[in-house]
Image (spheres, rainbow, N blue to C red):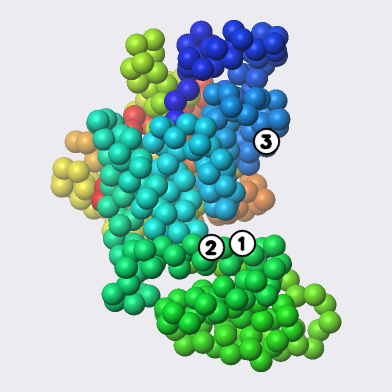
C-alpha cells in the first residue's frame, strides 16, 4: 500500500479532492495528519489503536475518495493482524470495488479468505493479485506468486478431503454454501442454517465443521439427541476436533439448564498461527519507491522492516527463527559457523509498552545476521514482564532494533520514555526470511 511522505505529493485523486472539495484546507490537513498517525500506529504494531483511529476517520471522508480507500486498507490490515478475519474480509470486500486495480487489496482479501477457510476464493483473489502485478519485480509481487502457489496446494488437499474426483465447481459451491450457513447462524436463523448444513453433510464430505455446526443448530433448537449425534459424527471424522468435543462435554448441563445457550460458529480454517503480512511503500516525485514498510506475523510475534525510527545508524540483519527444532549453529545463508553473542533488543509490546531485553542470540559475522529463536525470546520476555508489566504478557510484540551496551547500562537504572530510547536506537537493516 502506498502513501506519500509529504502533503505536496498526494496521489492524483487526493489532489483533486484537495482542490475541489468545499472542506477547508485546515480540516483537510488535519485529516491527512490523522491518516499518517494511523499509519504510524500500524508500523509500531498498535493495531487496536489503528482501528480506533481509522473508524473515527471513516465518517469524515467521502466514500469514493482516495483517502477513504486508504483508511479502509489500513483498517482491513489491522483487523487481519489481530486475527479478526471476518471484519478484515468484509472491509476488503468493500475496498476492492473502489479500486479493483490495486493488487495488494486482492492479496489481503485472499489472506482473510484463507483464514476463514474459503480456499477457492483465496486462489481466485491471489490469481487476480498476481495478474495485476505480473509486470513488476518487487518483493511483494514475488510474495503474491509464492502465496498463490501455496494456496493452490492447500485447495487441492482440501478438495481431496471431500472426495477424490470432486470438481473445482462442486467444491466452490460447497464452500459458498457453508459460508452462507455460518452467516445464517450468526443471524440466529437456525432452521435455515440447519437446512443448508444438512445438504452439505449429505454430500458425504469428511468435514467435521459441517457436523459440528449442525450440532449447534440442533442444540439451539433444544433437539439435544440430534445435537449429540452430530457432535459424535464430527468426532468420528476427527477425534481431536475440539469444537465438537467441547460442545459434547457441555451438552448434559445444557439439557438441564434453562439459560439460553451461548453459541459460536467455527470456520473451516483454524489455528492462531495463521500468517499475516502487510506492506507500505513510499514513493518520490518520479514515482520510484524511496522506502518500504513490511510487517509479517506468525502467532504473537511480528517482524518488520520500515522507514527508520531510531536516530542511530541501522545495523544487523535479523532472522526470527520460529522452529524449535533448528538452533542455527550454522548460518542458513552462508553455511558458516555462528557465534553466541549478547544483544540488547528493543521490543514494542501492544498497545504501547516498550522494554529492553539483554538476550543471548546466535550471530553470523560474515552475513551480519542476528538470529533470534522465537520460543526462547517469548519465554524470557514473559519472565521479564511478570516483574515489570504483567498486563502486557501474551500481547503482540515487535522487535524493532538494538541498543549499545553502554546505553543499556545507563537506561536500565532509570525511568525512560520511548522518545528517549529512539535517540539511541539502531534499527535493523533488513528482516531476512528463509524457506
How would you rate the neighbour count of disc 3 (Cα within 10 Å): few for under 14, some for 14-19, many for 20 or more? few
Q: Quadrant of residue 14?
A: top right
Q: Is residue 414 above or below residue 146?
A: above
Circles 1 and 2, Cβ within 8 Å, touching? The answer is yes
Which residue reaches farthest left? 335
Q: Earlier in the sequence, mark 3 or mark 2?
A: 3
In terms of image quadrants, where is residue 402?
A: top left
Nearest the eye: 364 or 349? 349
Helix, strand or loop under label 2? helix
Estimate the x, y position of residue 160 in percent, counting from the top left.
32, 73
* Image side of residue 183 versus residue 273, left or right: right
Labels in figure, total? 3
Helix, strand or loop at mark 1: helix
> Can residue 278 be seen in this snapshot?
no
Residue 134 in sight here: yes
Q: Measure the alpha-carbon separation of dots 3 and 1.
A: 23 Å
Residue found 66% across the figure and 81% down from its top: 218
How many neighbours does mark 2 have within 10 angstroms: few (below 14), some (14-19), or many (20 or more)? some
Instruction: Say which mark, if any, is on residue 183.
Output: 1
**Can you say whether 105 is above or below 321 in the image?**
above
Q: Which mark is residue 55?
A: 3
x%, y% of residue 236? 47, 88
Q: Residues within 10 Å of mark 1 (few under 14, many from 20)?
A: some
Front position among marks 3 and 2: 2
Residue 168 x/y as whole percent: 34, 64
Q: Disc 1 to disc 2, how far (Cα)?
A: 6 Å
Q: Label 3's element?
A: helix
Q: Mark 2 highlights which residue?
A: 179
Amino acid at each position: 500500500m502506498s502513501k506519500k511522505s509529504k502533503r505536496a505529493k498526494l496521489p492524483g485523486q487526493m489532489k483533486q479532492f484537495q482542490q475541489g472539495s468545499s472542506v477547508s484546507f485546515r480540516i483537510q490537513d488535519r485529516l491527512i495528519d490523522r491518516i499518517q498517525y494511523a499509519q504510524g500506529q500500524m508500523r509500531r504494531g498498535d493495531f487496536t489503536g489503528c482501528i480506533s483511529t481509522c473508524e473515527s476517520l471513516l465518517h469524515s471522508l467521502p466514500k469514493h475518495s482516495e483517502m477513504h480507500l486508504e483508511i479502509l486498507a489500513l483498517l482491513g490490515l489491522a483487523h487481519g493482524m489481530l486475527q479478526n478475519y471476518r471484519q478484515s474480509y468484509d472491509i476488503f470486500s468493500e475496498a476492492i470495488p473502489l479500486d479493483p486495480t490495486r493488487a495488494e487489496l486482492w492479496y489481503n482479501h485472499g489472506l482473510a479468505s484463507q483464514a476463514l477457510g474459503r480456499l477457492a476464493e483465496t486462489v481466485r483473489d491471489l490469481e487476480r493479485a498476481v495478474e495485476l502485478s505480473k509486470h513488476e519485480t518487487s518483493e511483494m509481487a514475488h510474495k503474491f506468486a509464492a502465496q498463490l502457489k501455496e494456496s493452490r496446494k492447500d485447495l487441492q488437499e482440501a478438495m481431496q478431503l471431500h472426495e477424490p474426483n470432486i470438481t473445482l465447481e462442486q467444491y466452490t459451491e460447497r464452500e459458498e454454501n457453508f459460508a452462507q450457513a455460518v452467516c445464517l447462524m450468526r443471524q440466529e436463523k437456525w432452521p435455515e442454517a440447519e437446512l443448508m448444513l444438512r445438504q452439505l453433510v449429505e454430500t458425504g464430505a469428511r468435514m467435521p465443521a459441517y457436523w459440528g455446526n449442525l450440532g449447534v443448530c440442533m442444540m439451539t433448537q433444544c433437539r439435544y439427541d440430534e445435537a449429540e449425534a452430530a457432535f459424535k459424527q464430527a468426532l468420528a471424522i476427527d477425534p481431536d476436533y475440539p469444537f465438537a468435543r467441547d460442545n459434547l462435554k457441555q451438552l448434559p448441563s445444557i439439557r438441564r439448564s434453562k439459560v439460553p445457550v451461548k453459541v459460536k460458529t467455527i470456520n473451516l480454517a483454524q489455528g492462531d498461527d495463521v500468517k499475516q503480512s502487510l506492506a507500505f511503500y513510499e514513493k518520490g516525485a518520479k514515482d520510484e519507491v524511496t522506502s518500504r514498510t513490511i510487517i509479517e506475523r506468525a502467532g504473537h510475534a511480528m517482524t518488520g522492516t520500515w522507514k527508520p525510527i531510531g536516530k542511530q545508524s541501522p545495523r544487523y540483519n535479523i532472522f526470527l527463527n520460529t522452529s524449535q527444532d533448528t538452533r542455527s549453529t550454522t548460518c542458513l545463508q552462508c553455511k558458516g559457523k555462528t557465534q553466541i553473542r549478547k544483544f540488547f533488543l528493543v521490543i514494542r509490546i501492544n498497545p504501547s509498552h516498550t522494554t529492553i531485553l539483554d538476550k543471548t542470540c546466535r550471530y553470523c559475522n560474515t552475513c551480519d545476521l542476528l538470529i533470534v529463536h522465537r520460543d526462547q525470546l517469548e519465554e524470557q520476555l514473559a519472565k521479564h514482564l511478570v516483574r515489570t508489566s504483567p498486563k502486557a504478557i501474551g500481547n503482540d510484540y515487535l522487535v524493532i532494533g538494538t541498543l549499545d551496551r553502554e546505553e543499556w547500562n545507563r537506561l536500565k537504572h532509570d525511568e525512560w520514555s520511548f522518545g528517549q530510547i529512539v535517540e539511541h536506537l539502531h534499527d535493523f537493516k533488513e528482516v531476512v526470511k528463509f524457506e
